[in-house]
Image: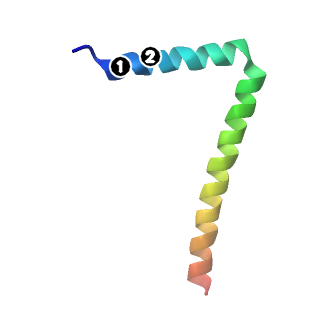
Amino acid sequence: MPPIKKIVTWILVIFFLYAILTNPDSAAQIFRSIWDVVYGGIRNIFEFFNQLLTS
């Protein structure tokens, strides 16, 4: 059985490099959107626990 996980990982890496090299503006916008979601989620978790501790 071939190492499926390794093959899929390489295909994804090649796809991401292709997407970044062919259209860097769109790739940057997608990355910024993902970063905003992650940052907002972490910030909200900290605010939630801060409210629990200060109440």
Q: Quadrant of residue 51?
A: bottom right
- Give the residue type at disc 2: Trp
Q: Residue at x 72, y 38 (%)?
A: 32
Image quarter where the C terminus lies is bottom right
Image quarter where the N terminus lies is top left
* SS for dot 1: helix
Q: What residue occupies the far right of the structure in this picture?
A: 25
Please say if 11 is above or below 52: above
Q: Are marks 2 and 1 in contact (CB under 8 Å)?
A: yes
What distance separates the C-alpha of mark 2 from that of mark 1? 6 Å
- Residue 45, position as x, y percentages in the image: 58, 64
What colouring does the structure picture have? rainbow
Q: Residues within 10 Å of mark 2 (few under 14, many from 20)?
A: few
Count of residue discs? 2
> Which residue is disc 1 drawn over?
6
Q: What residue occupies the far left of the structure in this picture?
A: 1
- Residue 15, position as x, y percentages in the image: 56, 16
> Which residue is disc 2 drawn over?
10
Q: Which is more toward the observer, 8 or 51? A: 8
* SS for dot 2: helix
Q: Quadrant of residue 52?
A: bottom right
- Give the residue type at disc 1: Lys
Q: Residue at x 62, y 56 (%)?
A: 41
Please say if 22 is above or below 44: above
Please say if 2 is above or below 43: above
Image position of 53 (left or right of 25): left
Q: What residue occupies the far bottom of the structure in this picture?
A: 55
- Residue 29, position as x, y percentages in the image: 75, 32
